[in-house]
Image: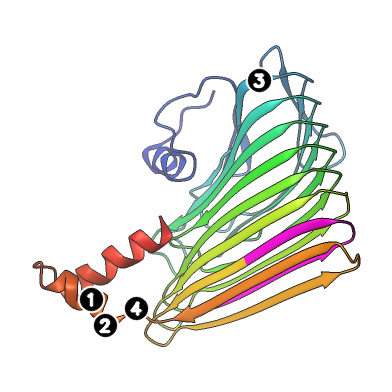
Amino acid sequence: MLEMDAIQKRLLEEVANLHDVPEGAYNFRANGQMAGRHTTANIDIQTKTDLPGIDILIKPGTKKESVHIPVVVSASGIKETVYNDFYVGDDSDVVIVAGCGIDNCGTQDSEHDGVHRFFIGKNSKVRYVEKHYGSGDGQGKRILNPVTEVTMEDGSVMEMEMVQIKGVDSTERVTRANLGKDARLVVRERLMTHGTQQAVSAYDVELNGEGSSADVVSRSVAKDSSYQKLDLCLKGNASCSGHTECDSIIMDEGRILAVPSLEANDTDAMLVHEAAIGKIAGDQLIKLMTLGLSEKEAEEQIINGFLK
């Protein structure tokens, strides 16, 4: 494994909660190059031959193993797109940790676009954690455009934690999912923008199998003059159940556009959407300020609890 500098190690900690080399399989990428790789008896990682990126092959029956594939960018002017495919065998139970951190102290934009495709076998369970983070005091932007595509076989489960709460100037997040019979998708998204940042987050979930279900919840905070668009679409094509929820706090001169969409193509499709956008309640601020907090400290406490 290549030696990482202090900035890269800090980014790695932010996006993957790693202080050292993790147990299990991993593939680290730094400034456009592979920085380290390790495979196990049940999880193989192969470099693609046709596109930049990797294939992650998880054997059927793999239990209680993990894969870490974080990316860190600490140089200004880097722009890359990588394609990572995950093949999860039947009857597996694994954790996959991804994410990207960009520290840009230069004048050129730095951008990482990752296209992740998941093929989840029958009766398998995947917990997927994707965190995005930006830092650096340069004029160059920090840009992240992730695409996540999920194909779920009968009886499979995927739990997704999608987090972006600091430092990313521009992002377009696209998530597509196709669910088979009795498959279940659970998504928890947390998003915060500030300054002049812009964030678009779009979900397109197709419930194609009988008994399939999806629960997609997005919580977001827009500060300063930042802008967010949340686009959540569920399509019920069989006897299924689906729920989406947009819950947002707007502050300062921030703007938020929530676009819920439910499409029922089967009489037994049960789809529900909830949406709420509002400011921090005055009584919440007053209560915390009576305990000795300043208004700014009270706001931070409320936001941290909301996005937890």
- Distance from Cα at disc 3 to Cα at disc 2: 48 Å
Q: Which residue is mark 3?
A: 63
Residue drawn at x 42%, y 60% is: 307
Residue 148 visible within the image: no
- Distance from Cα at disc 4 to Cα at disc 2: 6 Å
Q: x%, y% of residue 34? A: 63, 33
Image disc number at residue 280? 4
Residues at circles 3 and 2 in contact by the CB criterion of under 8 Å? no
Q: x%, y% of residue 95? A: 61, 32
Q: Is the residue 90 above or below the residue 304 in the image?
A: above
Residues at circles 4 and 2 in contact by the CB criterion of under 8 Å? yes
User: What kind of secondary structure does the magenta stretch mostly adopt?
Assistant: strand
Residues at circles 2 and 1 in contact by the CB criterion of under 8 Å? yes
Camera-near label (3 vs 2) is 2
Residue projecting furthest to the front: 268
Earlier sequence position, callout 4 versus callout 1:
4
- Distance from Cα at disc 3 to Cα at disc 4: 43 Å
Residues at circles 1 and 3 in contact by the CB criterion of under 8 Å? no
Q: Is residue 217 left or right of residue 236?
A: left
